[in-house]
Image (cartoon, helix red, strand yellow):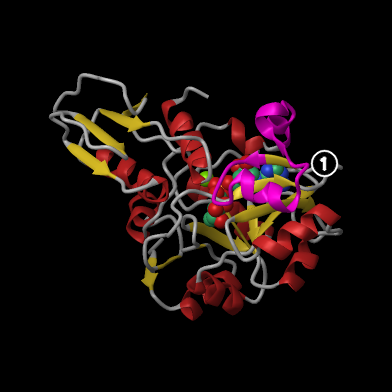
Amino acid sequence: MKTLLTQSSETAAEFIKQGGIVAFPTETVYGLGADAFDPHAISKIFEAKMRPPDNPLIAHVGSIEQVYQLAVEIPAAAKKLIDVFFPGPLTVVLPKTESVPLLATAGLDTIGVRMPSTWIAREFLAACGRPVVAPSANLSGRPSPTTWQAVREDLDGRIDCILQADPTVIGIESTVVDCTSEIPVLLRKGGVSLERLREIVPEIRDYDSDEIAASRSPGLKHKHYSPAAAVVIVQSDEQFDATPTDGFIGLRNRPGPFRLVSICPNAEAYARSLFEFFRECDRQGVRRIFCEAVPEEGIGAALMDRIRRAADTG
Ligand code: TXA
Ligand code: MG
């Protein structure tokens, strides 16, 4: 298959309308989209990414009306969250309608829904004229793509089209909140912090304190975000010995013979840079990546979650 590169939302949307699969930018990471109501198109996503079939997809909407095509009901807590955080890096899990194929939700009777905020994503979704299901546009297990070039690196020849735009602004995936239970549960940390969510819905539970979350959010059990290099977490005051095949990313400069270094001015910039830094380390044959730990507040909590998963320490 030849993968078309385009900067035209209209051109990219045409492939969606014809049952194809298209990578497109959002404020979090690039997604790989298909018509949310077309099982055959959805099956192509799983094939192209080599994604396990038990990992559900997120539906992206361009309008609130489209939420009602996907969900039979919007519980009160979800309504509040949607009012404040749509469009933005928040996914709410809702009871799904019959028209959403079970293939999209990995057999669950719920669907994750989010409304991206970047203008190009909004233009693309408007041109599609329907909800678009999309996981991150990487090969399964690899770091999520924050540039169109990273999408091409993983999926060239496997998908119909890449909608080219700027690197993504947030750089890690959306926050996922299950709103189908009496008390909403945070299933994945992401672009909207738990502190911010609790300003709107104070009773939201953190999945760390809710063991059933992993079974509710099947994707969480899969290995994620991993570069080929080994990832090592270091505390901000920790000494360590580096070699010339190591990389370092963090907030504070370190002496060392590193092959690749990224010093970030703050946690937001660190989150924005992390996945592309992982990919660049792989391109340059870095064998070990030292990641400086940051305080787990604001975006820092999601950032540490991704670093831990990459280091495979939970
Ligand atoms: O920022 C994002 O969320 C990006 C962009 C493209 O929107 N998408 C993304 O999708 O990260 P993906 O497939 O890499 O992660 C989707 C995760 C699943 O692995 C699962 O943990 C959770 O979202 N999820 C999706 N639907 C769910 C559902 N019905 N119930 C529980 N968890 C769900
Ligand atoms: Mg993903």
Left or right: 6 in relation to 9: left
Left or right: 270 in relation to 18: left
- Queried whether the magenta region covers residue 111, the answer comes back as no
Q: Residue at x 38, y 64 (%)?
A: 2
- Queried whether the magenta region covers residue 191, the answer comes back as yes
Q: Residues within 10 Å of mark 1 (few under 14, many from 20)?
A: some
Which part of the image, by quadrant, shows the N terminus? bottom left
Image coordinates for residue 314, horizontal then vertical, percent: 53, 24
Left or right: 182 in relation to 303: right
Res 110 visible: yes
Residue matched to label 1: 183
SS at mark 1?
loop
* Magenta-drawn segment: 187-216
Q: Residue at x 59, y 72 (%)?
A: 125
Q: Residue at x 30, y 38 (%)?
A: 249
Q: Name the kind of residue labelled 1 in the image.
A: Ile
